[in-house]
């Protein structure tokens, strides 16, 4: 589904990603973990077109993504949420979702302004769909509140609903559970599982290890801009390089890499 | 109906100015609604005024064609300069558009054979009738209100709040900004053309910095939340000096104080106050 071929990213002299090769198969929940500053969000920014790779290629269902403007990438089926929530705070929750809605009608934006084109019924349909997405993340009763007034956890869920409104084939979640309490995390997990079961590909960056280990069968670990491990949660948990990356190397420790 | 004739004889210019100022306020509303601080509207008004006037004076085209030409040319100029300048944001965009305005003024000033230079253009036939202005304002207001309440308006609000997030929702932010900028330029040009055909005389200095600030004041005073805000702002800024005529020399002073008070207490403009007032009055019922 998604393939990164020897992707590198430098900011001036600073190399943030080096020669990352990553092929993610269709269907499933995929985890991307690593210590702070490992380059995880950079990977998301490269996939969504906010950054262009210094070297290498990114393909999505066989089509090159790198070099396309971000909105074109979204239209090809990649949606994301943000590590630091980026909602339209003064707009209502419903409007936030409506902005992202892929217009299914055959009318262009401006033709639709003429009175006899059935624009209103299209708009009505979109509102229904948007409400559906909001109730899916459990926020049906908050649809008329300004998004900025919602709690942190709720805002993260609005971001997911908004991303779903773009009708993605791949959803990138950047620390979706940050700032959530245990109950909220549980709910979010079951929602993510449901989304994956409906055929959506999901890629998650998360610091909560329990969250990641439970959700993802396939996990990649980044450290200093390089992939240091990939595998199931058990394999990742026992991998000495991963343990070193997270805990640091210590000569007396058993977890020291033996290579 | 004699009083009406008298009234019109005295105030026709003022009434028509209210109309063209509403168009100018709506022109800056379009970019303000996207969160863009552009101050090139006075220059676009000037381009429109000169284009329409030159068409009337030098060619035999009918009046509506001259006016449309005056709206089209600034829109084309906006499309050309929009691409590079709209990448900028905030103060930098304001500075770039301000500089563009000065360039336009200086070009008009120096293209003497065409524009008459500092002397301006004299003896423009007074072809603008009240219904021309009314029609222009009516159609513009209708179109912009429909836009504001459609997904276009929603997208513009989204851009004003978070450009990057809007882009990542699959919306071509650059195209929306360019569209607002060019349509705003067309409206300013329309206002310029109409205005030139009732003031008899135009000169480059009418379209300089002061006019730019006045247009901005109309947009900010009324509020960029709705086209109605721009309308209110334009009417107030145009009529206030007349209403305060009795104050003599202190008039500009009070004018300024009113502006400062409104911006201090309602930075989103008068329209925002009017909108939220009834809501505050009655207790909201949870549904």
Image (tube, rainbow, N blue to C red):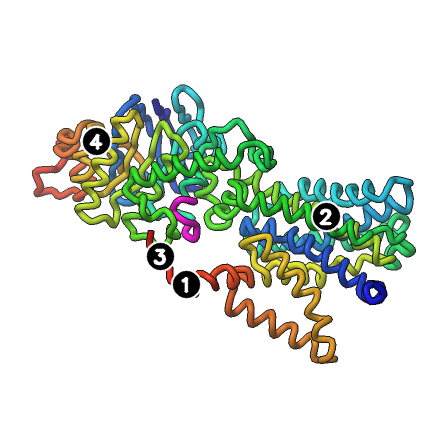
Looking at the picture, how far across and down is residue A162, in whole percent? 38, 39
Residue name at image x 31 percent, y 38 percent: A173
Q: Residue furthest front?
A: B1
Q: Chain of mark 3?
A: B
Could you say where residue B35 lies in the image, as x and y percent from the top left? 54, 51
Disc 4 designates what residue?
A216
The mark found on residue B136 in the picture is 2
Q: Quadrant of residue A207?
A: top left
Subunit bearing disc 4: A
Whether A94 is among the magenta residues is yes
Image-based side of B54 in relation to B148, left or right: right
Q: Is residue B224 magenta?
A: no
Q: To which quarter of the image does residue B203 belong?
A: bottom right
Q: Secondary structure at mark 2?
A: helix
Question: Left or right of A165: which side holds A120?
Answer: right
State which tag comes first along the sequence, 3 or 2: 2
Helix, strand, or loop for circle 3?
Answer: loop
Q: Which residues are magenta?
A: A89-95
The N terminus of chain B - image quarter: bottom right
Mark 1, residue position: B282
């Amino acid at each position: 589904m998604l393939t990164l071929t020897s992707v590198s990213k430098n900011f001036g002299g600073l190399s943030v990603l080096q020669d990352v090769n990553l092929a993610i198969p269709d269907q499933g929940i995929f985890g991307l973990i690593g210590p702070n500053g490992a380059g995880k969000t950079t990977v998301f920014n490269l996939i969504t077109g906010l950054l262009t790779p210094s070297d290498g290629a990114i393909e999505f269902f066989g089509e090159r993504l790198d070099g396309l403007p971000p909105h074109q990438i979204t239209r090809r089926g990649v949606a994301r949420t943000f590590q630091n929530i980026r909602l339209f705070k003064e707009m209502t929750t419903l409007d936030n979702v409506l902005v992202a809605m892929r217009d299914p009608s055959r009318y262009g934006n401006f033709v639709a302004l003429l009175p006899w084109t059935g624009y209103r019924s299209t708009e009505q349909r979109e509102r229904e769909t948007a409400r559906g997405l909001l109730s899916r993340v459990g926020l049906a009763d908050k649809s008329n509140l300004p998004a900025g007034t919602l709690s942190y956890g709720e805002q993260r869920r609005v971001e997911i609903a908004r991303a779903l409104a773009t009708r993605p084939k791949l959803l990138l979640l950047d620390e979706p559970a940050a700032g959530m309490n245990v109950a909220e995390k549980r709910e979010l997990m079951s929602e993510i599982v449901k989304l994956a079961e409906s055929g959506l590909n999901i890629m998650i960056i998360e610091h909560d290890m329990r969250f990641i280990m439970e959700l993802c069968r396939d996990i990649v670990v980044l450290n200093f801009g390089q992939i240091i491990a990939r595998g199931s949660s058990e394999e990742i948990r026992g991998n000495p390089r991963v343990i070193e990356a997270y805990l640091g190397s210590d000569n007396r420790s058993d977890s020291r890499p033996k290579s | 109906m004699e009083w009406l004739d008298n009234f019109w004889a005295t105030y026709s210019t003022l009434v028509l100015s209210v109309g063209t100022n509403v168009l100018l306020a709506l022109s800056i509303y379009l970019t303000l609604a996207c969160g863009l601080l552009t101050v090139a509207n006075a220059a676009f008004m000037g381009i429109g005024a000169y284009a329409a006037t030159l068409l009337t004076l030098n060619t035999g085209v009918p009046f509506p064609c001259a006016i449309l030409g005056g709206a089209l040319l600034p829109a084309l100029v906006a499309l050309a300069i929009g691409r590079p300048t709209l990448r900028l944001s905030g103060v930098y965009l304001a500075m770039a558009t301000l500089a563009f305005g000065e360039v336009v003024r200086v070009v008009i000033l120096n293209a003497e054979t065409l524009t008459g230079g500092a002397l301006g253009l004299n003896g423009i036939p007074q072809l603008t009738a009240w219904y021309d202005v009314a029609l222009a304002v009516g159609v513009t207001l209708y179109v912009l209100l429909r836009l504001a309440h459609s997904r276009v308006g929603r997208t513009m609000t989204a851009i004003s709040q978070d450009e990057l997030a809007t882009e990542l929702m699959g919306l071509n932010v650059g195209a929306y900004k360019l569209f607002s900028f060019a349509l705003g330029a067309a409206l300013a040009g329309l206002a310029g053309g109409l205005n030139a055909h009732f003031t008899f005389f135009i000169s480059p200095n009418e379209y300089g910095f002061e006019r730019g600030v006045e247009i901005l004041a109309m947009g900010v005073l009324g509020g960029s939340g709705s086209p109605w805000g721009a309308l209110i702002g334009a009417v107030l800024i145009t009529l206030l000096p007349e209403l305060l005529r009795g104050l003599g020399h202190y008039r500009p002073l009070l004018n300024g104080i009113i502006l400062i008070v409104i911006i201090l207490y309602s930075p989103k403009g008068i329209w925002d106050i009017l909108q939220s007032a009834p809501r505050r009055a009655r207790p909201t019922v949870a549904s």
